[in-house]
Image: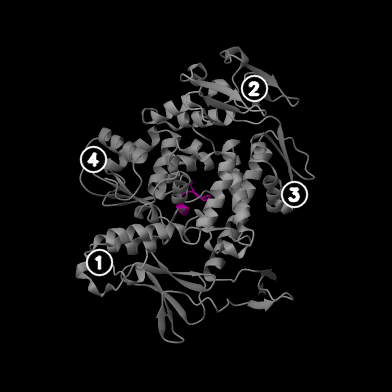
Amino acid sequence: MWLPAGWEIRLDNRGRPYYIDHNRRRTTWLLDQTVLPPGWEERVDNRGRIYFVDHNTRTTTWIRPTAIHLSNVAQWQSQYARSNSMFNQFEHRFLPQTENNSQLNDSNEEPLPEGWQRMLDNQGRPYFINHLSKTTQWEDPRQMNSSLFETPLPDGVEMCHTKEGQIYFLDRNTNTKTFHDPRLECNIANVKCKRSLPYKIRQFRYLCSTNATNGQLKLTIRRDRLFNDSFNHIIQFQSSELRRRLYLSFKHEEALDYGGVAREWFFRLSHEVLNPMYCLFEYANKNNYYLQINPASSINPDHLIYFGFIGRFVAMALYHEKFIDNGFSLPFYKRMLGKTLTINDLESLDPEFYNSLLWIKDNNLDENDDLELYFNTTFELLGKVENIELKPDGNDIKLTEDNKAEYLELMTKWRFTRGVEDQTKAFLHGFNEVVPLQWIQIFDERELELLLCGISKIDIVDWERNTIYKHYTQSSKQIQWFWQFVREITDEQRARLLQFVTGTCRVPIGGFAELLGSNGPQKFCIEKYGKDNILPRSHTCFNRLDLPPYKKYEILKEKLLFAIEECEGFGQE
């Protein structure tokens, strides 16, 4: 991190960063952002607007070059320089139910559901016609939730169609209509019994296919104006038009889009939205690549429109079965699902803030009267420091042992919403226009990441080679059992295990040797912990799995499977 001359960053005994200004012999929680980095200059244009000149790169920007901004630029440039390698890996991502799936041979096909017909377009690609709803789709209805086609509707409910052919359901009992199939709601209620991700994906695809819009969506994009062209196209269409069959091309390039061109577009654009010049997103932590909304995005006067566009774009990726390159942080996925965020969700997002709150949670404040903390906090944005009251009259309410539970709840909520509430609402509104948020409620946040980012083949040999052990050795029977377990489980379960320990399902381009933790490079670690009657724990900040010394392989397998399916990281016992 760049610091002004004479400045130093340190951590206090609670893990909180503070700054020392040796020039004036003082300490502060906030970095002096008025000092520009070497080679930068502040100027004013002929309209009186302030802008900044970077003489190092001979570029200009409206955004003040703070240490955090420069760190984001460096990370983005590093990723951009490796984009070709990243795209090669991106091309091999898959979903559990689509891996090695090819079109069924005609000789082995089971009959199509009543009212369906298989056709070929003028390029030889198979598609399917639903004569009942007068819609077409790429997905084979036999690979979707076919049982729903045969399940009768509840009494008093009729299936109808809009003028555009979109299915809706009319409930004569209550004189209401909905676009949600009531038969699907019955199945979702029993989802605990059918927990597999492929099953949930089939449910989601059913909703997409039965709400498809007739026609084609043709987009022609200039590579050198990727963001602007994509924005202008997507924002001008009605949301229903974005559910049409997608055809994409890059200008002046002759290529038929059999899916590959669209895949590249989703990859390139999902990376481009990170470009610091747009000031929309930032990395959640300097040592990982999770995305979070940039609180300073308001410096761009059109930022809310852009977030609505990105919400639409991400929903299109889900709807059209494509992947995005950069995934969001798990807390952001929980926001999309309407889940309550807890203090544990802060661990991978902001380790320093998390450790501060954890200290308050784990210590008796009546024995620490010198804290002098109140129900308030400060927030620095674009050079301005604002005092925030966590509740009415918070400036006068002192933190005590009796009220600390409320304090931790309010502080956690504030940390996740600080400066980004309007942007989040704009994103969710744009997403909901294309894919109703209710449709993704069947997934948990980890499954939603898998659905958006896909699964890459995990090199188990590389994983084992770059794993370290604490209080275990490579020859310990629990370690031998662990790697036996990793080899036996499915690709989806390996991805979920990786999520459980590291916070993400993705492996860095350079393999497991390049895993990052909260303090920089941090290899996958397995540590001996606890007794054999408890569940494993994970610490995503340190890529560490706390593995109890189980006495039988069957117990280790049972406990690990339960942990990766049911738990949410640190402290789940």
Residue denoted by label 4: 550
Q: Position of residue 201 (x, y in %)?
A: 50, 32
The kind of residue on which mark 4 rests is Tyr
Marks 3, 4: nearer the viewer: 3
- Label 2, label 3: how far apart the Cα atoms are: 31 Å
Q: Position of residue 438 (x, y in %)?
A: 49, 38
Q: Marks 2 and 4: in contact by CB < 8 Å?
A: no
Q: Earlier in the sequence, mark 3 or mark 4?
A: 3
Q: Could you say which disc has been placed on residue 222 in the image?
A: 3
**483 left or right, relative to 426:** left
Please tell me whether mark 2 sits on a helix, a strand or a loop.
strand
- Label 1, label 3: how far apart the Cα atoms are: 59 Å
The kind of residue on which mark 3 rests is Arg
- Label 1, label 4: how far apart the Cα atoms are: 41 Å
Marks 2, 3: nearer the viewer: 2
Residue denoted by label 1: 400
